[in-house]
Amino acid sequence: MSESNLEDLLAESADPAGRAEYERYPYIPGQTAYVLAQGYQFPKPSRRMVGDPYAVVRRLSFPIDIHQPGSVAERVREIEERCPHAVDAIRAMASSDLKRAKWGQSGPARPILLVGPPGCGKSTVARTYAEIFGYPTMTMNVGSMPEGFAFNGTHQTFGDSRPSAIVEFMAKSETANPVIILDEVDKAPNRTQHGCVQDALLPFLDVGEAKTFRDAFLNTTIDVSRIHWVLTANNLSMVSAPLRSRCQVIHVNRPDASHVHALSKNLIAEIAEDLGLSRKWFRLDGIELEALERHFSGDMRVLKRMVETIVEEQAETWGHG
């Protein structure tokens, strides 16, 4: 929305509270963005409605933030230290951040499809990227989704209708470019009564279509083109050709024994945080590291269980110290 259009809208508003809202959420080119179609106004709830069906997305009437993390190179190095086996994946996910740091602007982030064997840490590296860069993040296991309603929204003629989960998250996070992690896209059912999940994702992953994505519940277009999409799959052959063509495919190999030290340090930090304890209370000595390296099979899930065992044994010694 241009500044003149915004002024016209403010001038027409007789509601001081509404004007205050526009002043509270200003439009700043390059820093905030309108994602709803120009001039769209949410309908007022009718007396027959129970509550406000638009409450979860009304925030989108106003500009929302474009997250722009600083110290990009330093953040990339930190993630590479945590996930040394996935450097290609890290740099692909951070490509738009690196481009903005170098040229001052980034443009839409190309969707990333991480492919690799189970337990190689695809989801972990995606979550680590989002965490270190400070992006609001939503993770969805699409392998367990029977249909694509969560992405497209449901028409208001349905009894339990609601907006797209993606649109809801943009409103909740007040961010135009959050990170959305979609796990196990290769396992999503491809034949359902109301359309398959992989097909439902296609409009989001094409920049042109994403700028005018139509939410079935709101019945209007929404610009979702700034979202950072990270998809994971074990088997690339089970991902449809149209979906693959919209993504940059990055293969993530299993980590090996040379990565155990760095990965174990990160796992200790995660486990300590889950327990509400300081990571400084736990450490791995030479014998423990040697044992982990000797028994490591390349599966991050197994490594985490082994590190959890070490942490539990160290915690038990506290009571006998």
Image (spheres, rainbow, N blue to C red):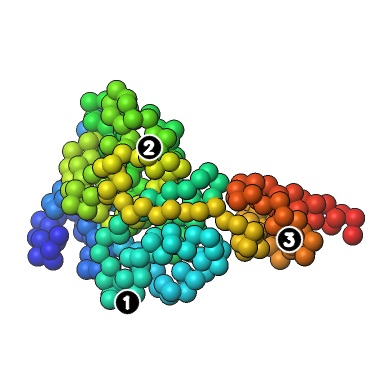
**SS for callout 2:** helix
Q: Is 305 rendered above or below residue 79?
A: above
* Quarter assignment of residue 266: bottom right
- Is 89 on the left or on the right of 16, as rendered? right
Q: Earlier in the sequence, mark 1 or mark 3?
A: 1
Q: Is residue 2 left or right of residue 88?
A: left
Residue under label 2: 238
Amino acid type of the residue tagged 1 in the rendering: Lys
User: Residue drawn at (67%, 52%), measured in percent from left and top?
Assistant: 296
Secondary structure at badge 3 equals helix
Asked which secondary structure carries label 1, the reply is: helix
- Badge number at residue 289: 3
**Marks 3 and 2, how far apart at CA:** 37 Å
Where residue 321 appears, as percent x and y from the top left, is 89, 60
Q: Is residue 162 visible?
A: no
Res. 146 in view: yes
